[in-house]
C-alpha cells in the first residue's frame, strides 16, 4: 500500500459527478473473515474492505492457525470449525479496530487456550468492560488493565454456558461478541438491547443456516456450526455516506454510489438527509449473505437543520461526522442528542467535531450526549483529523465544497478504513 501523506489540500468547489463503488463494507468484511475462519472448509471472500482494520482481523486469524491466502479479487480462508483454532505464540495486535478486539474476545473465550489481545494507543483507551462482563457471566476468564476494562486483554477460554444478557448499550460489537460465545456455549444465549443495533451478525447466521430467533431488540441463539461459503462483500454505506453528503452540499453534483450494502440498520443517514431536504434515491437490486444491496443516487439540493436523537442514533452513530458536515452547510439549527457513544470512538467525536466545525466558522455547542450545530456559512480553513479516519473524511468533503483553499492534517488516519478515499474523491470531482 502506498504511504499516505500527512496533509492533503483542496482548492475550491468541485461537484461530485458520475458513478463510484467505494470499498467493501468494513463491518461485513470483519464478520465474513471471522465466520469463514471457523466454518468447515474453504471460503472465498471478494470485495473486502481495504483498510488496516480488516487487515488486522485477517492477520489475527493467521496467528490462530487459520490459512488466509490472497487470491485475485480477494482472499480464501480455510477453516476447520471452532476447534480448528490454535493458540497463538505471540500477542495478537488488533491495531485500531474495536470490532476486531471485541468480537475476537467473544470468539476466543470458548477455546481451551490463552489469547492476549492488544491494539494501538487509541484502542487501549476504549472501554472493554461492556464485552468482558457478559462473557465472564458465561464462564470465560478475561482480565486486563483496570480489571478488564481496558486492553491489553487476556482471554482464557473454557466451558461456556448460555445467559440472558440485557445489554446496557445498543452495540453491535457487544451483541456479536456474546453471540460468538453463545455459538460455543451449552444452553440458550439471549441478548436484549435497549434499541436495535446493526444486525449483520444475525443476518449472516441466518444466511448460513444457523438457527437464530430475532424478535425486535431480542436475539436468541444456541450452539451452532456452518459450512464454508463464497461471497463478494458489498460496498460500505458508512464510506458511501461521505460521498452522499459531499454531493448533497456541493452545487452541480449528481453522483451514483453502486453495489452498496443497504441494511436498514446502516442507512439511517439517508433518512436523516432526506428529512433535511436532500435529493436522494435508493434502489435495492439483490440480496447477498442476507444483506440487501443496491444503489444510492444523490444530487445537490438546499438543506435545512433537523433533530437527530432517540432510536435512530444506533443506525447513524458512525455517520454523525458526515451528518455534522451536512448540518454545517444547512440553513437553521441541527440538534444531535442521545449520542454519548461518540465519546468512546476513535476520538472523542463530540469534542473533535465541535473543534473542526468551529474552525470552519460554524456555530457549534458540545453537549454531554451530542451537539447543537448552527449551520449556513462555513469558511475555508486548516482542519485536523485528530487521528480519526471519519473526522479526516468529514473534513475533506467540507473542504471540497468550499470556495477557497482548505487542508486536512493527519490524513494518514484514513488508512484504517479507506486509504483510497482521496483518490476516489478526485476521480468524481475532476474539473
Image: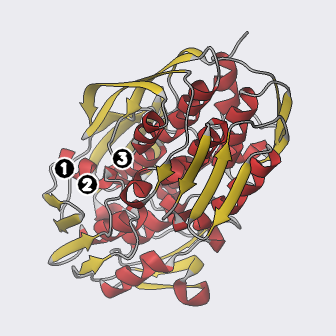
Is there CB contact under 8 Å for labels 2 and 1?
yes
Which image quarter: residue 421? top right
Q: CA distance from mark 2 to mark 1?
A: 6 Å
In the picture, the quarter occupied by the N terminus is: top right
Residue 245, image x, y percentages: 57, 33
Q: Is residue 136 above or below residue 295?
A: below
Q: Which residue is mark 3?
A: 78
Q: Is residue 36 left or right of residue 235?
A: left
Quick one: quadrant of the C terminus? top right
Give the camera-side residue of 48 and 348. 348
The residue where tag 2 is placed is: 202
Asked whether the viewer can see residue 56, the reply is no
Q: Tell me the SS state at disc 2.
A: helix
C-alpha gap between disc 3 and disc 1: 21 Å
Kindly report the distance in space between the C-alpha atoms of the residues bearing marks 2 and 3: 22 Å
In the current view of this chain or complex, which residue is farthest to the front? 332
Task: Give the label, 3 or 1, closer to the camera.
Answer: 1
The residue positioned farthest toward the top in the image shown: 431
For this view, does 185 lie left or right of residue 235? left
The residue tagged with tag 1: helix, strand or loop? helix
Residue at the spot 85% in from the left edge and 26% down from the top edge:
404
The quadrant where residue 174 appears: bottom left
Q: Please give the name of the residue rendered at 32% of the width and 64% of the height, measured from the top-left corner.
A: 195
**Label 3–label 1 contact, CB within 8 A:** no
Tell me which residue sits at (75%, 21%) in the image: 13
Where 189 falls versus 47 (above or below)? Answer: below
Q: Which residue is mark 1?
A: 206
Amino acid at each position: 500500500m502506498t504511504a499516505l501523506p500527512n496533509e492533503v489540500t483542496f482548492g475550491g468547489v468541485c461537484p461530485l459527478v458520475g458513478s463510484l463503488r467505494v470499498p467493501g463494507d468494513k463491518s461485513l468484511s470483519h464478520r465474513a473473515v471471522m465466520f469463514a475462519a471457523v466454518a468447515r472448509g474453504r471460503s472465498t471472500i471478494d470485495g473486502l474492505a481495504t483498510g488496516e482494520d480488516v487487515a488486522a482481523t485477517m492477520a489475527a486469524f493467521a496467528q490462530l492457525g487459520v490459512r488466509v491466502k490472497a487470491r485475485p479479487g480477494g482472499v480464501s480462508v480455510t477453516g476447520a470449525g471452532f476447534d480448528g483454532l490454535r493458540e497463538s505464540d505471540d500477542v495478537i495486535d488488533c491495531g485500531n479496530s474495536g470490532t476486531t478486539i471485541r468480537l475476537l474476545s467473544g470468539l476466543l473465550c470458548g477455546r481451551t487456550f490463552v489469547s492476549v489481545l492488544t491494539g494501538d494507543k487509541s484502542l487501549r483507551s476504549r472501554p472493554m468492560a461492556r464485552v468482558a462482563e457478559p462473557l465472564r457471566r458465561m464462564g470465560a476468564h478475561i482480565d486486563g488493565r483496570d480489571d478488564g476494562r481496558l486492553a491489553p486483554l487476556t482471554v482464557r477460554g473454557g466451558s461456556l454456558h448460555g445467559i440472558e444478557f440485557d445489554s446496557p448499550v445498543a452495540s453491535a460489537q457487544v451483541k456479536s461478541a456474546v453471540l460468538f460465545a453463545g455459538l460455543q456455549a451449552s444452553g440458550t444465549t439471549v441478548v436484549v438491547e435497549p434499541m436495535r443495533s446493526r444486525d449483520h451478525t444475525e443476518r449472516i447466521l441466518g444466511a448460513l443456516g444457523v438457527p437464530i430467533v430475532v424478535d425486535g431488540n431480542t436475539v436468541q441463539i444456541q450452539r451452532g456450526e456452518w459450512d464454508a461459503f463464497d461471497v463478494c462483500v458489498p460496498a460500505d454505506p458508512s464510506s458511501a455516506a461521505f460521498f452522499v453528503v459531499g454531493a448533497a452540499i456541493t452545487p452541480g453534483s449528481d453522483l451514483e454510489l453502486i453495489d452498496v450494502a443497504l441494511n436498514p440498520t446502516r442507512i439511517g443517514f439517508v433518512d436523516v438527509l432526506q428529512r433535511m431536504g436532500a435529493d436522494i434515491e435508493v434502489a435495492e437490486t439483490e440480496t447477498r449473505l442476507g444483506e440487501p444491496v443496491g444503489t444510492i443516487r444523490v444530487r445537490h439540493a438546499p438543506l435545512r437543520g433537523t433533530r437527530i436523537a432517540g432510536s435512530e442514533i444506533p443506525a447513524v452513530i458512525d455517520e454523525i461526522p458526515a451528518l455534522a458536515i451536512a448540518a454545517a452547510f444547512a440553513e437553521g439549527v441541527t440538534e444531535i442528542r442521545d449520542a454519548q457513544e461518540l465519546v468512546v470512538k476513535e476520538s472523542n467525536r463530540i469534542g473533535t467535531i465541535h473543534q473542526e466545525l468551529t474552525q470552519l466558522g460554524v456555530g457549534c455547542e458540545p453537549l454531554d450526549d451530542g451537539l447543537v450545530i448552527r449551520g449556513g456559512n462555513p469558511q475555508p480553513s486548516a482542519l485536523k483529523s485528530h487521528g480519526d479516519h471519519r473526522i479526516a473524511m468529514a473534513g475533506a468533503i467540507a473542504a471540497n465544497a468550499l470556495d477557497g483553499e482548505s487542508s486536512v492534517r493527519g490524513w494518514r488516519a484514513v488508512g484504517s478504513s479507506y486509504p483510497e478515499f482521496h483518490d476516489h474523491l478526485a476521480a468524481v470531482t475532476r474539473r
